[in-house]
């Protein structure tokens, strides 16, 4: 099963610890993880590895190498959709889903003959879990839905 968690990257105010961590990284390390064997590159790789381990622990994932960090929502959804769906698969999504999911799903309908069921949300933007559950089928390969939508 694929799990996608958005970090609300477009939200303006971040906790101070986010600004501090980014500032510290840029001032003291400033290297890409996994790209070099010099001291700062190793430090960057260690930070990324620690983040993967912590995230895996929170999510109950036994193999932290299965945790993938992406640049943004569009990249993450494209990787999940295009990397997961096979010919004839079924996807469940909601009426609230963003274009970054709906556009690649439309492409997959054409390219891989997938089917997509869109569960309607109420006027408050709430999707009834039973409605979602009732749409699941043996060929359902992916569920894509936002935690919150603004």
Image (tube, rainbow, N blue to C red):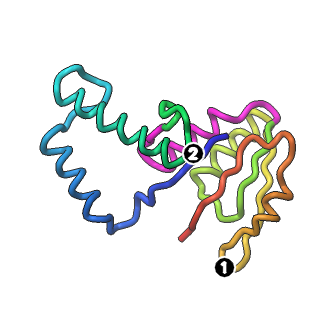
Q: Quadrant of residue 17?
A: bottom left
Residue in the picture at 74% in, 31% down: 86
Q: Which of these two is toward me, 87 or 128?
A: 128
Q: Quadrant of the N terminus?
A: top right
Quick check: 118 above or below 55? below
Residue assigned mark 1: 124
For this view, does 92 lie left or right of residue 66? right
Question: Residue 132 location in percent, x, y?
Answer: 78, 60
* Residue 77 sits inside the magenta stretch: yes
Report, in whole angstroms, how far the alpha carbon at label 2 lies from the one at label 1: 25 Å
- First of labels 2, 1 by sequence position: 2
Residue in the picture at 67% in, 34% down: 84
Farthest bottom residue?
123
Crowding near pointer 1: few (<14 within 10 Å), some, many (20+)?
few
Q: Which of these two is toward me, 46 or 91?
A: 46
For this view, does 85 lie left or right of residue 47? right
Crowding near pointer 2: few (<14 within 10 Å), some, many (20+)?
many
Tag 1 secondary structure: loop
Q: Quadrant of residue 52?
A: top left
For this view, does 15 lie left or right of residue 106? left
Q: Which residues are magenta?
A: 68-88
Residue in the picture at 49% in, 41% down: 56
Residue assigned mark 2: 77
Question: Residue 98 location in percent, x, y?
Answer: 60, 58
């Amino acid at each position: 099963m694929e799990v996608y968690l958005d970090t609300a990257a477009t939200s303006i105010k971040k906790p101070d610890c986010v600004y501090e961590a980014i500032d510290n990284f840029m001032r003291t390390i400033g290297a890409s993880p996994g790209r070099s064997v010099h001291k700062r590159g190793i430090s960057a790789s260690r930070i990324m590895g620690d983040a993967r381990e912590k995230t895996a622990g929170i999510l109950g994932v036994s193999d932290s190498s299965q945790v993938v960090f992406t640049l943004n929502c569009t990249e993450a959804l494209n990787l999940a959709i295009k990397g997961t769906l096979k010919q004839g698969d079924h996807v469940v999504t909601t009426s609230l889903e963003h274009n970054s999911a709906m556009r690649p799903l439309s492409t997959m309908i054409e390219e891989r003959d997938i089917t997509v069921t869109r569960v309607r949300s109420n006027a408050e933007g709430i999707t009834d879990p039973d409605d979602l559950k009732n749409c699941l089928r043996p060929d359902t390969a992916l569920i894509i839905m936002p935690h919150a939508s603004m």
